[in-house]
Image: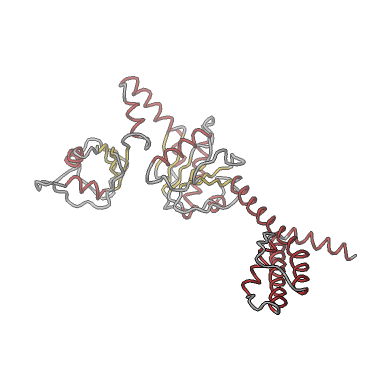
């Protein structure tokens, strides 16, 4: 009966890992302190130079089986204490303790690899869905190519993978339904800087509905997040009307337009390819006009966007377009700066509105 009770007790301890870990720590503490007390009490009687620190040090090096040899039990009481607290209790307990630590570390690594844990990230990027490895790798490379995002953590959220298929610096995997708010809670959406929702499956245009639904869930949790969604079929853009997406990108439409444009005007595709990547040459950037004071040049004349563009060319900055509301203006004559305008420009580095204004008005 006693044996059966002990077996049942051990089973309960194993099932309740926190109880088992606490018990092991308690036994380890008893072994260390018990041996130290015996060594200090009995051996100090014959060697008064022994201190409490020496006794604790002797216990630690004994239970870890290092045994430097600088201390050893001299009296019978101290030796019996070593046998009881180190040999009988300590060595086995310490081995179990190390095993628990290794098991804990392995569990954490395995959980993170399979995306079952909680992302420990802040000011990060959410990349939702995993259409294929090449596409996601391209997104990661582009984010890494931008100095602003090079060190930013990226959290991949999807239910299409069993585990992350590659090792990438600062990339965290969270596995779960992209329509479940709890999945985004584990991805720490509250601390995320922006989110990119990719197509769920490039072979199925109906996946636009999944993208719109995922974007709607994200918007309901954190309306202020900068949200960009991918749409395969322009006929499905109405699915995003009820979603507060900052941008809906129709990749197939853009690539189709570019194919036709390149066939008629060779060189366009090469230029677009260069300015839309942050890894080579100059890049397309954007900045919002937060305030619109009257801009005066060095000669005192007021500057509209056309005059601003001419002055920026001296610094190899090309003002490409001004987005005002839902209209993109590329003909800039007579268009003056207004708060809320988004300037799209080509440059070698990212500049905000204040920096562009300083460069345009410098002597």
Residue 1 as seen in the image, left or right of residue 313 = right
Residue 267's quadrant in the figure?
Answer: top left
**Horizontal and vertical percent for residue 98?**
68, 57
Residue drawn at (61%, 49%), measured in percent from left and top?
Answer: 109
Q: Residue furthest top?
A: 263
Q: Is 353 rendered above or below residue 31?
A: above
Residue drawn at (9%, 46%), measured in percent from left and top?
Answer: 299
In this rendered view, identify the residue nearer to me: 94 or 222. 94
Tell me, yes or no, if residue 230 can be seen here: no
Give the number of marks. 0
In this rendered view, identify the residue nearer to me: 238 or 20. 20
Q: Residue furthest front?
A: 46
Q: Residue furthest right?
A: 1
Q: Is 292 rendered above or below residue 159?
A: below
Residue drawn at (42%, 41%), measured in percent from left and top?
Answer: 144
Colour mapping: secondary structure
**Horizontal and vertical percent for residue 346?**
28, 37
**Horizontal and vertical percent for residue 243?**
45, 46
Tell me, yes or no, if residue 322 can be seen here: yes
Residue 95's quadrant in the figure?
Answer: bottom right
Quadrant of the drawing holding the N terminus: bottom right
In this rendered view, identify the residue nearer to me: 252 or 262. 262
Residue 104 as seen in the image, left or right of residue 279 = right
Residue 167 as seen in the image, left or right of residue 61 = left
In this rendered view, identify the residue nearer to me: 50 or 325. 50
């Amino acid at each position: 009966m006693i044996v059966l009770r002990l077996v049942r007790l051990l089973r309960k301890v194993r099932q309740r890992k926190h109880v088992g870990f606490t018990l092991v720590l308690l036994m380890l503490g008893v072994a260390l302190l018990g041996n130290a007390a015996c060594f200090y009490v009995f051996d100090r009687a014959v060697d008064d130079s022994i201190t409490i620190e020496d006794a604790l040090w002797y216990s630690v090096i004994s239970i870890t089986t290092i045994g430097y040899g600088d201390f050893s039990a001299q009296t019978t009481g101290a030796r019996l204490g070593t046998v009881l607290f180190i040999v009988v209790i300590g060595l086995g307990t310490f081995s179990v303790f190390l095993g628990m630590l290794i098991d804990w570390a392995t569990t954490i690594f395995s959980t993170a690899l399979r995306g079952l844990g909680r992302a420990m990230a802040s000011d990060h990027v959410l990349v939702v869905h995993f259409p294929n490895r090449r596409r996601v790798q391209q997104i990661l490379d582009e984010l890494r190519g931008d100095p602003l995002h090079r060190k930013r953590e990226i959290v991949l959220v999807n239910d299409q993978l069993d585990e992350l298929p590659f090792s990438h610096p600062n990339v965290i995997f969270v596995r779960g339904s992209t329509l479940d708010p709890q999945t985004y809670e584990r991805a720490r959406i509250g601390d995320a800087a922006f989110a990119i929702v990719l197509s769920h499956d490039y072979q199925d245009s109906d996946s636009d509905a999944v993208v719109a639904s995922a974007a709607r869930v994200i918007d309901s949790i954190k309306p202020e997040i900068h949200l960009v969604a991918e749409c395969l079929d322009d006929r499905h853009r109405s699915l995003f009307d009820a979603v507060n997406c900052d941008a809906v990108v129709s990749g197939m439409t853009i690539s189709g337009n570019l194919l036709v444009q390149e066939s008629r005007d060779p060189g366009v595709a090469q230029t677009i390819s260069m300015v839309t990547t942050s890894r080579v040459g100059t890049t397309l950037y954007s900045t919002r006009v937060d305030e619109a004071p009257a801009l005066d040049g060095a000669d005192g004349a007021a500057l509209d966007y056309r005059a601003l563009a001419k002055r920026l060319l001296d610094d190899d900055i090309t003002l490409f377009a001004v987005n005002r509301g839902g209209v993109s203006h590329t003909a800039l004559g007579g268009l003056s700066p207004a708060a809320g305008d988004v300037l799209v420009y080509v440059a070698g580095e990212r500049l905000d509105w204040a920096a562009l204004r300083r460069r345009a008005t410098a002597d």
